[in-house]
Image: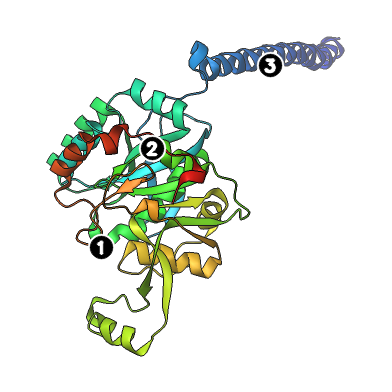
Amino acid sequence: MPMPSSRKFFQARPQSNLLRRSIVLTLCFVIGIAGLLSFAVVVSRGRIGGGDKCNYSKPLSVSVVWDKSGGSTGGLVSDGDRKRHKVMGFVGIQTGFGSVGRRQSLRKTWMPSDHQGLQRLEEATGLAFRFIIGKTGDASKMAELRKEAAEYDDFLMLDIAEEYSKLPYKTLAFFKAAFALYDSEFYVKADDDIYLRPDRLSLLLAKERPHSQTYLGCMKKGPVFTDPKLKWYEPLGYMLGSEYFLHAYGPIYALSADVVASLVALRNNSFRMFSNEDVTIGAWMLAMNVNHEDNRQLCQTECTPTSIAVWDLPKCSGLCNPEKKMLELHQKESCANSPTLPAEEED
């Protein structure tokens, strides 16, 4: 008698458990969906929030991971999951650990030193500006950089050694980082020792162009032989009519979004790295068959109503004694306050 009763008991128990488990799972599913919807609302409000300033993000310092083999992994370490910030142009100002004085001169002249000023400049011109710097094993220098970044928050920091010999790698890392963070029509590489007019640069980048792949700069013809051991060959090369290729001067040049997208898609070490950064980029542009757009307003030695970038060509690769010269130029009416001529009035 006990056996049948026991058998009936064990047959009924799984059905009861199954029913209870189904109810629990259903409740958990409903609660989970509700939680996900609530989370989505909170996140969207957090991203969209900020009232009338929703279109402009606070400048953030980020780090781009650089792998040991010398190529960018494309991974980004930043504050949260950010969408690409939409701008017309992103200007990366290349700087180093020994350029604190240069950065201070820039912040006292054409580049605002506060978040609100940077935001107003972006609103007025469509251009975002950040200092671009790598890293060093010197703990004291890194501590000073972190202190400066915390004060101004106008850096984009790359996880690559900040060395002169690594400039081509740093430049490629910069373009990859900028492309990942900013949805921009042009990406501009600029040095920290030039005097720039952001309003005129904005007008230049906003022009209609028939080519989607554009390499914009003050162009020069440079030698194929970039090895320092072959520098003696250059005068002879000119006399013999050796083959030279066109590329932009290094202090400032711009690449269109399509060109940078192609660079980002490159596998590590796909193209050769030369000793000079401007020659390296120029060689890549030649290999990619992009359109070269020469603009002499990017390499003026004096401020004029049409000059975009001013530096001491050919005496120096930027301004000679830039910390002092930058401040002197900014005091001139022709540099800081001269009206910008319409395009049809330009030379």
What percent of the width, then of the height, locates residue 97? 19, 45
Task: Please tell me in which quadrant of the rendered image residue 329 appears.
Answer: top left
User: Element under label 2?
Assistant: helix
Label 2: which residue? 198
The Cα–Cα distance between marks 1 and 3, rounded to whole angstroms, is 54 Å
Query: Mark 3 and 2 residues: CB-CB less than 8 Å, in contact?
Result: no
The Cα–Cα distance between marks 1 and 2, rounded to whole angstroms, is 29 Å
Label 1: which residue? 165
Q: Residues within 10 Å of mark 3 (few under 14, many from 20)?
A: few
What percent of the width, then of the height, locates residue 236? 28, 87
Name the residue located 61 percent from the left edge and 12 percent from the top edge: 38
Q: Which residue ends up furthest to the bottom in the rendered image? A: 240
Q: Residues within 10 Å of mark 2 (few under 14, many from 20)?
A: many
User: Element under label 3?
Assistant: helix
Quarter of the figure that contains the N terminus: top right
Above or below, comparing residue 69 to residue 133 in the picture: below
Residue 202 relative to residue 261: left or right: left
Name the residue located 52 percent from the left edge and 22 percent from the top edge: 55
Q: Residues within 10 Å of mark 1 (few under 14, many from 20)?
A: few
Name the residue located 53 percent from the left edge and 31 percent from the top edge: 83
For badge 2, the amino acid type reads: Pro
- Decide if residue 100 is in sight here: no
Which of pointers 1 and 2 lies earlier in the amino acid sequence? 1
Residue 180 relative to residue 171: left or right: right
Which of pointers 3 and 2 lies earlier in the amino acid sequence? 3
What percent of the width, then of the height, locates residue 98? 15, 46
Depth check, mark 1 against mark 3: the one in front is 1
Label 3: which residue? 33
Q: Nearer the viewer, residue 199 or 170?
A: 199
User: Element under label 1?
Assistant: helix
Name the residue located 83 percent from the left edge and 12 percent from the top edge: 12
Which of pointers 1 and 3 lies earlier in the amino acid sequence? 3
